[in-house]
Amino acid sequence: MICPIDGNAGTSYINTLSGDDNVGISNRMISYTWTYEVGEIIETLERHCESSGEDPKRTYIWICCLCINQHRVDEQRENGKTVSFEELKTTFSSKVSDIGHMISMMYPWNKPKYLERAWCVFELHEACTNKNVRVTIDMPPKERRKLIDEILAPGEEGTECLVTKFFSTLGNTKVEETDATVKEDKERILNLIKDFKKFDLTVNEYIREWVIELILDEVKLRSQSFSDIRKTLLARSEEALQSSLREHTGFLTSIGHFLYRIEEVCRAIEVLEQCCKLCKDYCSNGHIDIANSRNNIGTLLVSERRFNEAIVHYSSALEIYQEMNHVDMLKTLHGIGNIYQWQGKISDALEKYQEVLDRSNSFRESENGNTAVDNIKPIILNSCANVFYDQDSYGKALEKYRDVLEIYTGCRDASEFQFDQDGNNDDIRWNHADTATILTNIGNVLRDQAIKIKDVSKIQEALINCRLALRIQESLLVETWNTKELISELESKVRENRSTP
């Protein structure tokens, strides 16, 4: 077929089409990597049209493999020529500006191939920073479902692992580490970028925001779906409605917790408030789901230091929990105690913490007790220790921290920890991040106590605790910076004392 542009044999695919249902002036450009399969690209474009309410027959996509004359590309290659970087860049900049809307295809969500290609990352950055271009990031429907499913059920590794994966995927794009088919293209792209950190940050922030919007869009879709079917469910039976309600509120709660873990607190609160409203609309006033929703919102408000609002939600939750004599009242009372502590109401905070300890003993003796009771005691004792430490009551703080250590390990002091002949200890109670944290806290108290009463032996005791904490942290591959800094400070004080006559 003769190309209508240059009159030579061989033309682009787009020039073989006719009719408004098949070809027209482009109103979208798709940016993708050639490793994606045709079916995946089609599914992504179909999903884009569906979500944006566009008619697929009138959504005209500029896609390089079909719109660029590949015959001419092959001819140049056979003649030992390649399309220059400058020509490719100029073509892209001109096309994306003229079209005004670029779709970037991300797949798979937890390791997008798109972000591994220099040209793709460059195109995304250029489009994001062009005020005349709208950028939409999209993926195949099955990949979207996979992302949502992982948030709802993060598996054995848990939510923390999923959050880590989220940040490592969507906050770690580095253009310097990408690849390009033509090595010189990557070099020229890097030469154009004056500030790699700023470039990477722009791309990462845009992608992160896209995933959050995707999640919130799923919230809207599922909320609308529940709204559409609730009358049908109610007509069938109250049980059917409540079952669907529990499923939907469980979804909203999981999304709210995930958004909180990725530091999107305000959005998390909005989602949990939707959950709370649904519970109020369809549950009785004293329903456990209302209490749980109120408690969750209170916890997030505390993280935003909106203490007065948090107290209102905590109090509403506590009223329901107490009426039901439900064990979850313990965590609500603890939350209220924390607020008092942060507000400087120390006596009120200690009173509330003591109430939790008293009630936990009551639950432990009754049939209502469960693991929640055992889990909360060390948390409360740690909160009490923190209060005493902030008040410079080092003796009381040390006693409480050691109470926590005893609960975790059965021992009250690091000196009781025993290594085998190979220098190992397989006791799982000691090999835990929380144990290391308590040991570091004890080290902090002993250091300050040593300074206050001028007792050098306390420095040595602090070192024993901190060195053991560091050993545990390193074996678990968790953050060690604070512990290392404290050890360095303690060792410096030991050297000072040795050099002092």
Image: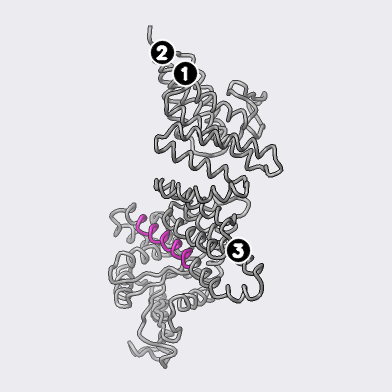
The label shown at residue 354 is none
Residue at the spot 38% in from the left edge and 61% down from the top edge: 206
Q: Quadrant of residue 474?
A: top right
Residue at horizontal 55%, vertical 43%? 331
Tag on residue 497?
2
Q: Are marks 2 and 3 in contact (CB under 8 Å)?
A: no
**Mark 1: amino acid:** Ile
Q: Quadrant of the C terminus?
A: top left
Q: Badge 1 is on which residue?
A: 459
Q: How many numbered marks are there?
A: 3
Q: Is residue 177 left or right of residue 409?
A: left
Is 342 or 3 nearer to us in this picture? 342
Relative to 298, is 228 above or below? below
Give the camera-side residue of 140 and 64.
Answer: 140
**Where 48 falls versus 276 (above or below)?**
below
Mark 1 residue crowding within 10 angstroms, few (<14) / some (14–19) / many (20+): many
Q: Residue at x 41, y 72 (%)?
A: 103
Residue beneath disc 3:
247
The residue tagged with tag 1: helix, strand or loop?
A: helix
Real-space CA distance between mark 1 and mark 2, rounded to the nearest whole angstrom:
10 Å
Q: Is there a contact, CB below 8 Å, between mark 1 and mark 2?
A: yes
Work out how far the residue at label 2 is from the one at label 3, CA to CA, in angstroms.
63 Å
Within 10 angstroms of label 3, few (less than 14), some, or many (20 or more) residues? few
Magenta-drawn stretch, dominant element (helix, strand or loop): helix
The image position of residue 458, as x and y in percent, is: 48, 17
Residue 276, image x, y percentages:
51, 59
Magenta region: 200-217
Q: Nearer the viewer, mark 1 or mark 2?
A: 1
Front position among marks 1 and 3: 3
Residue 384: x %, y % from top left: 51, 31
Q: Amino acid at mark 3?
A: Glu
Is residue 434 shown in magenta? no
